[in-house]
């Protein structure tokens, strides 16, 4: 073979960037189409709304992506969000300072993630099973704690936060950057990020190379739990109540965003910017469908079709690249 | 499976000695790599045709085109006088072209018997015919002279044994044209002999055979003709009687090698590691010492317990008795992490299962053990990450378009170089190399042995496991022979001859099912 004969390309880096650009182009295209076909899409109000809708799924998708890269899955994140709204509401109503209440809620998310790590690493349970178990039991625990009622939060400043904007951009969207930028640095420029990939690719080889596989898995689920609890805080602020049944099905939206963003469910392939874009593409489709008066049931169908189309073309490209 | 090899050769379409398969300008481009430049070559019916060449020369690519695993970029393949598209593996098999690939491509979770008939189970072997299937498979395996059980799960066999099963599988499928891609890489001499017997028998039955190997003596032992590939180009074809070792090597690498086994005898220094009466799964009561500046070789049959011994030493498996001294002090090694912290490095036996993250870049694979060193706090120094990877790629001459290419896109031998290369920058004191040169070409082997010397002169010690006797024989200062989990003999450098060592390794009949080596 001769490596010089054909201009050497940089398969991986370029591929990632290219795929990101494709998604961005798709997002822009959707926005342009919707601004022309509806009168209200491009209004400041609607755009802020869309950003708010997309932000929370986007943050969940980042945590989910860490887990999927290791070859796992976290089905619990929707339930963790709902549970976190309850915790946050109860703590705030109990008169605990808001920042402390938020910190404690985040710690609950960390604890749930650690529990998942424990179940997978120490008890040898498949990720699908342990997180599925958490999914149902957390909703149950939340209902027990609230007797099935919603807890309304009596703290205006806390609720203001999610409604306000900074520099004309909704606070919730700033939160995406707050999570996304460190996550990007962590995944692509830190040692532990590399370990997430290597464990997802071949745990045994990583282990023999001195990578602490168990710790890496603990870390992935903990980060996912943390992201979910954070989203719970944001949601509590947005809706002003704590309710364990909130965020129903968000785990699937997070997984879908991640997959649309180029994450491979087989592990070892993924990025941070992909899932973020994926989440906003999904949000745009839902928002656009609403404005176009498309039946809400169709939105679900469209989302399904979109997942198949994007993942299929991504797979085609990857295969032809071999 | 409906017919055995025997039935199939009743009606030879092509008379022995005439061209059965012809390549006309066969070419393959991968993105970034021109793997095979137009190759024109004819194979004669009934010959054993060896193909040799450096790592990444395009040998496996050629095979993948012939077996329909990969589509060709351009060119023609003429089979028995007619052009063949060879678009799918199925088409190749229907013509009678089969291959035993470099990496075993069978289902590890199925039984040996199920694998033998995979894709060809007919109604005779329906769900209720499991036992008949096992019986049939056992008959074939026994008939080939392999000492292997048909009812066990394939994944429980060693790689070498799996390779034999792959060979057995290929022979029962109505084969007229059979390709072996480095079949002996993981085999011991005894198993290799069984395989050679099989190959010769197939030849007598009229099967045409392509045999790819990096071991010259095998080529001279088996082949009628030999073709040399270099950089995707066919350099030439020779009758085996008219060529010699040196000429082939020169054709392969365009220069000559005076000495493959580079050996400097250093005076051994202080002991680095001492195993005292160590026992564990697969081995028992093994004691040995590795000192600074020496290579300790472990020879034995597949399943003799050598790999289990070193992985236990490395903390991957629990020891059941005995203790380990590191630089004279008693140590507890409970995990590979402990071992690495002390200063051990292990290049494991199976590059696919233990050695590589195949769907990740070459650079990441090479740097995996040293990320701690090339990062400050948690952040990786991008510049160091790049220079470290590029240095190993240059030192070991790893053929890859860039360090960002996925490890899976490299040729087998080049993948093997990553498994070794990732430890070279690590600065360990004890290096354990388990079959380090499997599938590596002659030129690079010489390079790797030179690197061994460099490690030794820096005060490191090496444990070298090889199923290829000449390698341990020429390199090891101390040579331990393993048999059935026990250390049965110890020799100094060249103090015993090949025959004695082989006898000690064999002694009794090998168990029917050994664990992993
Ligand atoms: N799937 C692939 N994608 C991209 N490049 C590939 C792929 N497979 C092989 N190559 C490249 O094609 C070239 C030839 O590879 P091939 O596997 O044919 O070598 P080989 O002669 O069999 O070497 P070895 O002795 O190491 O097995 C190599 O440079 C390799 O990197
Ligand atoms: Mg090859």
Image (cartoon, coloured by chain):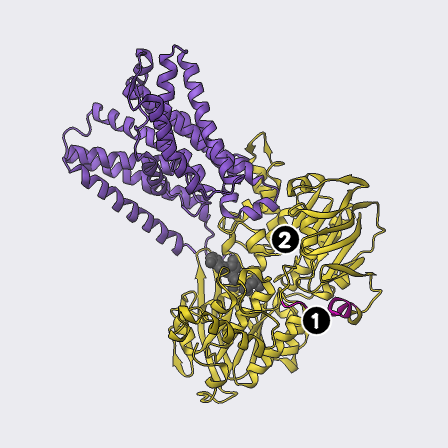
Q: Earlier in the sequence, mark 1 or mark 2?
A: 2
Q: Magenta span covers which residues?
A: B501-512
Name the image quarter holding residue A22: top left
The residue at 53%/54% (across/down) is B400
Q: Residue B510 lies in magenta, yes or no?
A: yes
Instruction: Give the letter of the chain under mark 1.
Output: B
Query: Label 1 belongs to which residue?
Result: B509
| Number of numbered labels in the structure image | 2
The residue at 47%/27% (across/down) is A111
Name the image quarter holding residue B257: bottom right
Label 2, residues with CA under 10 Å away: few <14, some 14-19, many ≥20: many
Q: Secondary structure at mark 2?
A: loop
Q: From the image, state the color of chain A.
A: purple
Q: From the image, state the color of chain B.
A: yellow
Is residue B343 placed above or below B297 in the rendered structure?
above
Q: Residue A181 lies in magenta, yes or no?
A: no
Q: From the viewer's side, name the closer residue of A309 and A265.
A: A265
Q: State whether label 1 is within 8 Å of ligand 2.
A: no
Instruction: Quarter of the image for the C terminus of chain B: give it.
Output: bottom right
**Which mark, residue B348?**
2
- Labels 1, 2: one chain: yes
- Quadrant observed for ligand 2 in the rendered image: bottom right
Instruction: Give the letter of the chain under mark 2.
Output: B
């Amino acid at each position: 073979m001769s490596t010089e004969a054909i201009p050497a390309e940089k398969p991986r880096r370029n591929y990632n960037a290219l795929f990101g650009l494709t998604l961005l182009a798709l997002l822009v295209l959707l926005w342009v189409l919707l601004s022309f076909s509806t009168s209200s899409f491009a209004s400041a109000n609607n755009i802020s709304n869309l950003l708010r809708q997309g932000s929370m799924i986007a943050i969940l998708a980042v945590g989910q992506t860490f887990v999927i890269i290791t070859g796992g899955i976290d089905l619990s994140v929707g339930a963790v969000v709902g549970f976190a709204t309850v915790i946050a509401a109860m703590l705030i109503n109990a008169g605990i300072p808001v920042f402390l209440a938020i910190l404690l809620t985040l710690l609950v998310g960390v604890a749930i993630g650690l529990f998942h790590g424990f179940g997978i690493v120490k008890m040898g349970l498949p990720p699908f099973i342990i997180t599925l178990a958490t999914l149902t039991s957390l909703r149950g625990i939340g209902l027990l704690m609230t007797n099935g009622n919603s807890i309304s939060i009596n703290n205006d400043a806390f609720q203001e936060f999610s409604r306000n904007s900074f520099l004309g951009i909704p606070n919730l969207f700033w939160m995406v950057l707050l999570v996304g930028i460190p996550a990007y640095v962590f995944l692509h420029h830190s040692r532990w990020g590399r370990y997430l990939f290597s464990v997802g690719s071949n745990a045994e080889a990583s282990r023999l190379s001195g990578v602490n596989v168990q710790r890496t898995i603990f870390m992935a689920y903990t980060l996912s739990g943390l992201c979910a609890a954070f989203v719970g805080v944001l949601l509590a602020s947005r809706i002003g109540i704590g309710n364990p049944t909130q965020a129903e099905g968000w785990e699937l939206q997070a997984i879908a965003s991640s997959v649309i963003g180029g994450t491979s469910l087989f592990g070892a392939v993924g990025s941070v910017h992909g899932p973020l874009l994926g989440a906003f593409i999904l949000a745009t489709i839902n928002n656009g469908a609403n404005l176009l008066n498309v039946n809400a049931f169709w939105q679900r169908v469209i989302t399904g079709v979109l997942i198949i189309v994007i993942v299929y073309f991504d797979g085609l490209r990857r295969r032809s690249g071999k | 499976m409906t017919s055995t090899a025997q039935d199939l050769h009743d009606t030879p379409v092509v008379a022995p000695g005439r061209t059965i398969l012809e390549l006309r300008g066969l070419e393959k481009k991968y993105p970034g790599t021109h793997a095979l430049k137009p190759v024109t070559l004819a194979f004669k019916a009934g010959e054993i045709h060896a193909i040799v060449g450096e790592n990444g020369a395009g040998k496996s690519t050629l095979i993948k085109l012939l077996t329909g695993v990969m589509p060709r970029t351009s060119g023609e393949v003429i089979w028995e006088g007619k052009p063949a598209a060879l678009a799918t593996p199925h088409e190749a098999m229907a013509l009678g072209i089969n291959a035993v690939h470099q990496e075993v491509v069978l289902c590890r979770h199925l039984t040996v018997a199920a694998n033998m008939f995979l894709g060809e189970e007919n109604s005779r072997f329906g769900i209720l015919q499991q036992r008949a299937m096992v019986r049939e498979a056992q008959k074939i395996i026994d008939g080939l002279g392999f000492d292997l059980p048909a009812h066990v799960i394939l994944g429980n066999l060693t790689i070498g044994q799996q390779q034999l099963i792959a060979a057995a599988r290929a022979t029962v499928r109505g084969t007229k044209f059979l390709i072996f891609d480095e079949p002996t890489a993981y085999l011991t001499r005894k198993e290799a002999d069984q395989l050679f017997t099989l190959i010769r028998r197939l030849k007598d039955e009229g099967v045409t055979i392509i045999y790819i190997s990096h071991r010259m003596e095998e080529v001279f032992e088996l082949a009628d003709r030999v073709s040399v590939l270099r950089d995707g180009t066919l350099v030439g074809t020779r009758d085996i009687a008219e060529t010699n070792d040196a000429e082939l090597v020169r054709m392969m690498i365009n220069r000559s090698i005076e000495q493959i086994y580079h050996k400097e005898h250093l005076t051994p220094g202080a002991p680095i590691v001492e195993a005292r009466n160590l026992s564990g799964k697969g081995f028992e009561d093994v004691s040995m010492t590795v000192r600074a500046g020496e290579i300790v070789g472990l020879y034995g049959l597949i399943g003799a317990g050598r790999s289990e011994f070193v992985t236990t030493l490395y903390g991957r498996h629990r020891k059941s008795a005995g203790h380990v001294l590191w630089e004279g002090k008693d140590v507890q090694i409970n995990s590979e992490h402990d071992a690495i912290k002390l200063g051990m490095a292990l290049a494991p036996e199976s590059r696919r299962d233990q050695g590589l993250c195949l769907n990740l870049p070459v650079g990441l694979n090479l740097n995996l053990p040293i990320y701690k060193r090339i990062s400050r706090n948690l952040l990786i120094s991008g510049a160091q990450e790049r220079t470290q990877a590029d240095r190993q790629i240059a030192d070991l001459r790893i053929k890859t378009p860039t360090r960002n290419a996925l490890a899976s896109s490299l040729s087998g031998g080049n993948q093997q170089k990553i498994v070794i290369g990732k430890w070279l920058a690590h600065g360990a004191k004890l290096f354990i190399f388990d079959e380090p040169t499997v599938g590596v070409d002659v030129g690079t082997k010489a390079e790797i042995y030179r690197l061994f010397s460099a490690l030794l002169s820096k005060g490191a010690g090496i444990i070298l496991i090889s199923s290829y006797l000449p390698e341990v024989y020429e390199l090891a200062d101390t040579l331990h022979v393993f048999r059935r989990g026990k250390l049965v003999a110890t020799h100094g450098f060249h103090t015993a001859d090949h025959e004695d060592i082989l006898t000690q390794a064999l002694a009794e009949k090998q168990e029917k099912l050994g664990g992993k080596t």
